[in-house]
């Protein structure tokens, strides 16, 4: 199946999935592996430490993959950021991502050089500002995510749905995304792509020790220790301090292997250590969902053109009422099914079409007998 959103068009990659920047970990090799698997890898400039090393790393990444990747400049963390940007422009990096704090002057330079600028932030307010400054897309990280923090940050679901009402450039959702359900949910909320950090780290190619990967497999999102790292001491001074500082302690520390660090609530979906390709396939070619949604007989499989599609026929039990439910929200993104067929499927499902603002995503939900 071919995925097509404004994000795949902007990045030139196969899937609307980006790897998150990672200070100390986001090297060229990891970025190239993610790109090779069809998502967009991200070389974190901060890891190169000097502009000349960044130049070398960009070249090595290019040698390792002919597919597109981006370079991240984390404001406040990337050393010699002006010179690092010079190198990106000189080396012809097509997509440059800025993150964390205000990046207006870097964004201006990226745009003046005719390149694509994506800005990552934790708040809708700052995303709107970046859009005004000319960003080609914005990444919004919800509270569930690792890394970037802000005192006004909201959970991913609220952030993306709220942003989709206001922002016109493509939105990339981040924070707690790691399986088909969270990926599709982000698209249904109005995002046109997702960014994942934790889920990509816990892969065979992940640039962390096997010991830490196994810890991620064992980790659960409601572990108070993990919660305090991802959402530090909510409601306390500690929380305020971390949020105002702009980063969670996870990315400030060296001891990645000794604590529940460098991971987010996305550990909820880490139950083994797959390859990057397997992660992407598990997300983009989902199997039937797990409880509370149970599989039932296909409703629309007789419709020409629908059977090979990744639509899912499900039955949901709510208050003793059984609903047939067909979830087709990525048919329009893929642009492979004419509207009429989707409407036929909706009619058969007895459901209704709910266009999601901005993306043309469609979610068909409704009673379809028993
Ligand atoms: C170990 C680690 C280091 C990170 N370092 C950075 C960074 O330097 N700059 C940045 O913008 N984001 C950084 N992030 C955030 C990710 O790029 C991404 O936004 C986040 O992981 C998304 O949330 P998720 O982990 O729930 O997928 C880091 C994340 C992790 C896990």
Image (cartoon, rainbow, N blue to C red):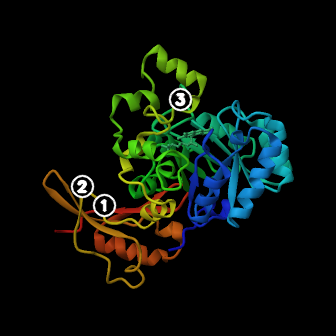
Gap between marks 3 and 1 measured at Cα: 32 Å
Name the residue: 50% across, 40% down. 159
Q: Is residue 98 above or below residue 282?
A: above
Q: In what quadrant of the picture does the C terminus appear? A: bottom left
Most distant residue in the left direction:
320
What secondary structure is found at the residue carrying circle 3?
Answer: loop
Secondary structure at badge 1 equals: loop
Q: Residues within 10 Å of mark 1 (few under 14, many from 20)?
A: some
Looking at the image, residue 253 lies above or below residue 67 = above
Viewer-closest of 165 and 28: 28
Residue 74: horizontal and vertical position, in percent?
68, 37
Residue 367: image location, x then y, percent: 24, 64
Which is nearer the eye, 291 or 249? 249
Which numbered dot is residue 14? none
**Residue 174: percent from left, percent from top:** 52, 45
Residue drawn at 44 percent across, 51 percent down: 178
Residue where numbered disc 1 is placed:
289
Task: State if disc 3 and disc 2 touch (CB < 8 Å).
Answer: no
**Please, is residue 137 above or below residue 159 in the view?**
below
Q: Is residue 325 left or right of residue 274?
A: left
Tell me if residue 293 can be seen.
yes
Q: Earlier in the sequence, mark 3 or mark 1?
A: 3
Residue at point 37% right, 80% down?
A: 307
Q: Nearer the viewer, mark 2 or mark 3?
A: 3
Residue 369: name its quadrant.
bottom left
Which residue is farthest top? 237
Q: Is mark 2 within 8 Å of ligand 1?
A: no
Q: Secondary structure at mark 2?
A: loop
Q: According to the image, label 2 marks what residue?
A: 291
The residue that mark 3 highlights is 248
């Amino acid at each position: 199946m071919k995925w097509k959103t404004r994000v795949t068009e902007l990045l030139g990659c196969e899937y609307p999935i980006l790897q998150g920047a990672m200070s100390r970990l986001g090297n060229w090799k990891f970025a190239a592996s993610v790109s090779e698997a069809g998502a967009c890898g991200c070389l974190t400039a901060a890891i190169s430490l000097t502009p000349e090393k960044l130049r070398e790393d960009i070249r090595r990444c290019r040698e390792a993959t002919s597919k597109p990747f981006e370079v991240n400049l984390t404001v406040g963390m990337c050393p010699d950021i002006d010179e690092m940007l010079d190198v990106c422009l000189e080396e012809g990096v097509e997509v440059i991502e800025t993150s964390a704090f205000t990046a207006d002057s870097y964004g201006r330079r990226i745009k003046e050089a005719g390149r694509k600028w994506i800005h990552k932030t934790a708040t809708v307010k700052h995303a709107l500002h970046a859009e005004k400054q000319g960003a080609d897309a914005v990444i919004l990280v919800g509270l569930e995510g690792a890394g970037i923090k802000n005192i006004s940050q909201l959970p991913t679901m609220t952030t993306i749905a709220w942003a989709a009402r206001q922002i016109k450039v493509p939105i990339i959702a981040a924070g707690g995304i790691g399986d088909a359900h969270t990926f599709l949910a982000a698209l249904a909320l109005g995002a046109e792509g997702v960014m994942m950090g934790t889920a990509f780290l816990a892969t065979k190619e992940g640039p962390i020790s096997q010991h830490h990967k196994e810890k991620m497999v064992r980790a659960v999102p409601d572990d108070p220790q993990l919660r305090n790292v991802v959402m530090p001491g909510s409601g306390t001074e500690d929380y305020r301090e971390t949020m105002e500082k702009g980063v969670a302690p996870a990315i400030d520390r060296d001891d990645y292997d000794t604590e529940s660090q460098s991971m987010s609530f996305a550990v909820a979906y880490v139950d083994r250590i797959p390859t990057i390709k397997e992660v992407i396939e598990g997300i983009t070619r989902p199997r039937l969902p797990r409880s509370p949604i149970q599989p039932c007989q296909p409703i629309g499989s007789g419709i020409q053109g629908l059977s090979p599609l990744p639509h899912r026929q499900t039955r949901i039990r709510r208050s003793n009422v059984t609903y047939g439910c067909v979830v087709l929200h990525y048919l329009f993104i893929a642009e492979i099914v004419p509207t009429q067929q989707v409407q036929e499927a909706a009619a058969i499902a007895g459901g209704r079409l709910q266009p999601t603002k901005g993306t043309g995503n469609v979610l068909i939900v409704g009673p379809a007998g028993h």
